[in-house]
Image: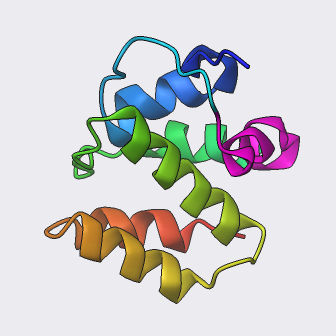
């Protein structure tokens, strides 16, 4: 299955506002968890709302997510937390350990989870 991040809908905005400019290109093998996140309409609606809030927040500094693998991992973490498959605490720990120095951004995201 070929994949373009533009298929995420809000994913393009995610890359611009939340994480980083996208690396262009496609991948030939895709993690099923990424596909599940992309196809989860309630998650996408929540994510789109989060992105609007982030864009409006001048204090928010983008996370240094610069590769497709990092972007997909972050999307999976968000989806897992949204669905309650990992706790908010686990999401915070994942983000803060991978992207230190972004505690405000992490708290901002986590506080908006349902």
Please give left or right for residue 38 compared with residue 19 in the image.
Answer: right
Residue 40 among magenta residues: yes
Query: In the rendering, at what x and y percent does residue 5 appear?
Result: 56, 21
Chief secondary structure of the magenta portion: helix
Query: In the rendering, at what x and y percent does residue 16 appear?
Result: 37, 26
Residue 56 appears in the rendering = no
Residue 28 appears in the rendering = yes
Query: In the rendering, at what x and y percent does residue 60 appear?
Result: 27, 51
> By what rule are the colours in the image chosen?
rainbow
Q: Looking at the rendering, in which quadrant would you find the C terminus? A: bottom right
Residue 113 location, quadrant: bottom right
Query: In the rendering, at what x and y percent does residue 77 appear?
Result: 56, 62
| Residue drawn at (40%, 74%) of the image | 94
| Residue drawn at (34%, 20%) of the image | 23
Please give left or right for residue 111 compared with residue 113 in the image.
Answer: left
| Residue drawn at (57%, 29%) of the image | 11
Q: Residue furthest left?
A: 101
The magenta region covers 30-44
Nearest the viewer among 36 and 11 is 36
On screen, 100 above or below 90?
above
Q: Residue furthest front?
A: 29
Q: Looking at the rendering, in which quadrant would you find the N terminus? A: top right
Nearest the viewer among 38 and 109 is 38
Residue 25 location, quadrant: top left
| Residue drawn at (26%, 36%) of the image | 66
Residue 52 among magenta residues: no
Count of marks placed on residues: 0
Please give left or right for residue 36 compared with residue 100 in the image.
Answer: right
On screen, 80 above or below 85?
above
């Amino acid at each position: 299955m070929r994949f373009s991040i533009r298929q995420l809908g809000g994913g393009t905005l995610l890359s611009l506002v939340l994480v980083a400019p996208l690396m262009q290109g496609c991948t030939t093998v895709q993690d099923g968890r990424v596909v599940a996140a992309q196809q989860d309409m309630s998650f996408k609606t929540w994510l789109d709302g989060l992105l609007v809030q982030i864009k409006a927040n001048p204090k928010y500094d983008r996370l240094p997510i610069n590769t497709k693998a990092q972007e997909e991992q972050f999307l999976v973490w968000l989806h897992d937390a949204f669905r309650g498959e990992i706790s908010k605490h686990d999401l915070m720990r994942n983000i803060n350990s991978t992207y230190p120095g972004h505690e405000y951004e992490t708290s901002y995201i986590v506080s908006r989870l349902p």
